[in-house]
Image: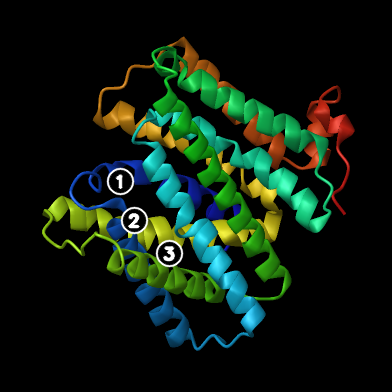
């Protein structure tokens, strides 16, 4: 599948999952909901890889990394971000999560000694600034209480866990482990860990929820997890984390558009500025060096060096 199609699919799916998550909150505990989500995802993934007869036997070291993938991308990151949103606004949570752009660049440099193009840092900065502008009015009403600061720390820890999970995915790709195979094991381990946590805690496996809960759960499990993670991890492998990660700052654009269509969101000056900065950063990160040099001869493209 072409990279641009993977990119668009990931942005549209993950950008729309916030609507589905709204129907998940309040009826079933977050841990139990995540167990259901990844159990369904694991069943779908294993059904697919077995149907495709993909090789699923790996050594103990690889299984250790599958567990780390489960913790980083299919478990701990979600729990920390869910808990953070108990005291944070969606704006603060979005801004905190957007820092994964920068964390992925730093971690790629630390773990794989891969040079990062200067234009990627500039593009990341534009993207994060754009998200701040997008939510500027909402941020103005944020109360920086101790509870808010705790929520912010939880959100940043969840973002860091997700970034480490991304590094595990890159490691698996470097070891010639297929994205589908790695995800199938990661989702299985995630559901087992979340299920074990639920069994040995005061929580219970609640099944009494309305139709909207189960419909949104299926959307999150199949589209938001199976399909979106397969697309995203394929992009990590194909175009590198510094470019694939820019997907993260495009989520709020989809969210704002959906809010405009379904919730009557009103665009203001900061909305247009935020959109402009995010799109400019996206172009800077994704466009090839030759195009940037031709049309922006005095831009950060002059500082670009090939990562290899």
Q: Answer with mark 3 or mark 2, whichever residue precedes in sequence.
A: 2
Q: Name the residue: 41% across, 68% down.
A: 193
Residue placed under numbered mark 1 in the picture: 21
Model colouring: rainbow
Front residue (pair 7, 198): 198
Secondary structure under tag 2 reads: helix
Residue placed under numbered mark 3 in the picture: 226
Residue placed under numbered mark 2 in the picture: 220
Secondary structure under tag 3 reads: helix
Please state the horizontal and vertical placement of residue 227, each as a whole percent of the image. 44, 62
In the rendered structure, the answer to whether residue 214 lies left or right of residue 223 reads left
Question: How far apart are the two marked residues, 2 and 1, measured between alpha carbons?
Answer: 8 Å
Q: Answer with mark 1 or mark 3, whichever residue precedes in sequence.
A: 1
Question: How far apart are the two marked residues, 1 and 3, measured between alpha carbons?
Answer: 16 Å
Front residue (pair 167, 292): 167
Q: Are marks 2 and 1 in contact (CB under 8 Å)?
A: yes
């Amino acid at each position: 599948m072409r990279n641009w199609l993977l990119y668009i699919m990931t942005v549209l799916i993950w950008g729309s999952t916030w609507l589905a998550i709204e129907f998940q909150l309040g009826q079933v505990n977050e841990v139990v909901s995540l167990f259901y989500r990844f159990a369904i995802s694991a069943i779908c993934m294993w059904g697919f890889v077995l149907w495709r007869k993909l090789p699923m036997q790996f050594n103990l070291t690889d299984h250790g990394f599958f567990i780390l993938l489960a913790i980083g991308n299919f478990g701990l990151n979600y729990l920390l971000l869910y808990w953070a949103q108990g005291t944070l606004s969606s704006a603060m949570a979005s801004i905190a999560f957007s820092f994964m752009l920068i964390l992925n660049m730093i971690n790629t440099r630390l773990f794989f000694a891969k040079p990062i193009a200067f234009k990627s840092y500039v593009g990341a900065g534009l993207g994060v600034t754009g998200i701040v502008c997008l939510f500027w009015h909402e941020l103005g009403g944020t109360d920086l209480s101790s509870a808010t600061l705790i929520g912010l720390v939880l959100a940043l820890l969840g973002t860091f866990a997700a970034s480490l999970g991304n590094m595990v995915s890159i490691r698996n790709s470097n070891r010639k482990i297929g994205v589908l195979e790695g995800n199938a094991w990661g989702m299985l381990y995630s559901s087992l860990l979340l299920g074990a946590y639920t069994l040995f805690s005061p929580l219970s496996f609640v099944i009494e929820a309305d139709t909207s809960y189960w419909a949104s759960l299926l959307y999150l499990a199949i589209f938001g997890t199976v399909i979106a993670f397969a697309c995203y991890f394929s992009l990590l492998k194909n175009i590198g984390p510094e470019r694939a990660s820019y997907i993260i700052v495009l989520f709020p654009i989809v969210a704002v558009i959906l809010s405009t269509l379904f919730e009557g969101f009103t665009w203001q000056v900061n909305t247009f500025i935020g959109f402009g900065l995010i799109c400019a950063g996206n172009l800077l990160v994704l466009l090839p060096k030759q195009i940037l040099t031709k049309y922006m001869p005095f831009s950060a493209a002059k500082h670009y060096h090939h990562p290899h």
